[in-house]
Amino acid sequence: MKESILNIQILEPSKPNNWLTNGETFSKKVYLGMNDSPSNWREVSDEEKTEIIEKQIHNKSKEV
């Protein structure tokens, strides 16, 4: 018989209107993978999220 134990780390923002980001992705709930760490994620407000997305769009347009 094979037995496995599964531990899952789940991150959620402390304030319901906030988001979690790793600088590339945004989520309300993050299920951390084996090689990920909570230190790779931070909580941001809607306003900060908008600013980050605008910077990403701006940087992409420079690449073209």
Image (cartoon, rainbow, N blue to C red):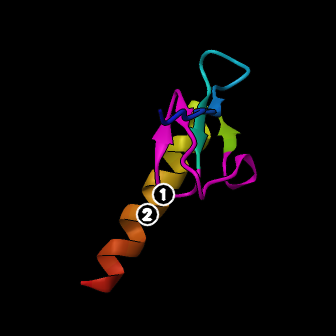
The quadrant of the rendering that contains the C terminus is: bottom left
Circle 1 residue: 24
How many labels, in total?
2
1 part of magenta stretch: no
Query: Is residue 39 covered in magenta?
Result: yes
Residue type marked 2: Gln
Q: Name the residue tied to disc 2.
A: 56
Residue 4: x, y in percent?
Answer: 55, 35
Query: Which portion, as a residue range, is magenta?
Result: 22-41
In the image, residue 18 lies at what x, y percent?
62, 26
Task: Using the image, tell me which numbered label, if any, was put on residue 55.
Answer: none
Give the vertical position of 13 relative to 56 (above or below): above
Residue 20, picture quadrant: top right
In depth, the one of 55 and 26 nearer the eye is 26
Please name which of the two marks, 1 or 2, marks the residue nearer to the observer.
1
Q: Residue furthest top?
A: 16
Choose between 50 and 7: the one closer to the eye. 7
Circle nearer the N terminus (1, 2): 1
Percent across and percent down for residue 57 are 36, 63
- Residue sitting farthest toward the front: 1
Q: Is residue 34 above or below residue 28?
A: below
Place of residue 9 in the rendered image (x, y in percent of width and height, measured from the top left):
65, 34
Magenta-colored segment: predominant secondary structure: loop
Residue drawn at point x = 48 percent, y = 57 percent: 24
Q: Are marks 1 and 2 in contact (CB under 8 Å)?
A: yes
Task: Indicate the secondary structure of the residue bearing disc 2.
Answer: helix
